[in-house]
Amino acid sequence: MQFDVLNQAQWPLLLAGVDEAGRGPWAGPVFAAAVILDPTKPIEGLGDSKKLSAKKRDQLAMAIKERALAWHIASASVAEIDHINILQATMLAMQRACNALQPAAQLALIDGNRLPAGLHCQARTLVKGDAQVPAISAASILAKTARDALCQQMHEAYPMYGFDQHKGYGTALHQERLREHGPCVEHRRSFAPIRKMLENV
């Protein structure tokens, strides 16, 4: 039988949704989360984390952690991003999140079109899965809220950059602060804008 990722009748009980947050920013780690939802404890309001308010994401993150059968949040550091590139670092964070689940997943549905290597279970990809599969939505929310919390810590350590506002993305404000202060240790030196800035110092 050909497997249809959107046919819930074919899903095993221990289905993990896996998603990432933070591939695009110029600073900070990239995060990933894996979630196995409990069908007996439904969570209302799950959806694409990018379309939810910060307050709603925080509320849902608490519900996910309380009601899911299993969840785990992992990351890949700035040093790892600069060493192996952002795509491979993202795959590594996803692998770490998925393989740490207890109980282990029987099947992982990965948001996007690339499978991480080294997963301990079968896996399939699903483009825009965070808007279609509740477990992926839940993973998206956990990854996003974890990274946002880290950005707040980065802001407290380096308040001159405004990480609490732009979350590390290359906004006009971020570019202005970079020109004024130069990159800090949280900036991804493998990213072209940061690399060029360092070359011109």
Image: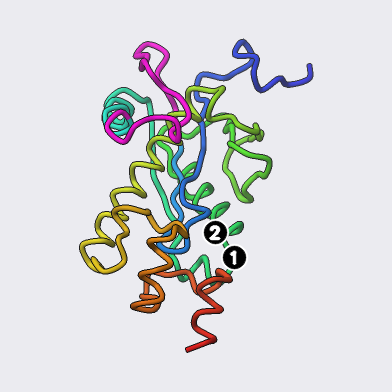
Q: Secondary structure at mark 1?
A: loop
Q: Secondary structure at mark 2?
A: helix
Q: How far from the left and from the top, in percent, is residue 152? A: 26, 54
Residue plotted at (41% across, 50% down): 74
Left or right: residue 113 compared with residue 159: right
Q: How far from the left and from the top, in percent, is residue 189? A: 50, 74
**Image: magenta residue range:** 35-56
Give the CA distance from mark 2 to mark 1. 6 Å
Q: Name the disc covering residue 85, or none.
A: 1
| 39 in the magenta segment | yes
The amino acid beneath tag 1 is Asn
Do the residues under discs 2 and 1 have CB atoms within 8 angstroms? yes
| 32 in the magenta segment | no
The amino acid beneath tag 2 is Ala
Q: Name the disc covering residue 89, or none.
A: 2
Which quadrant of the view contains residue 89? bottom right
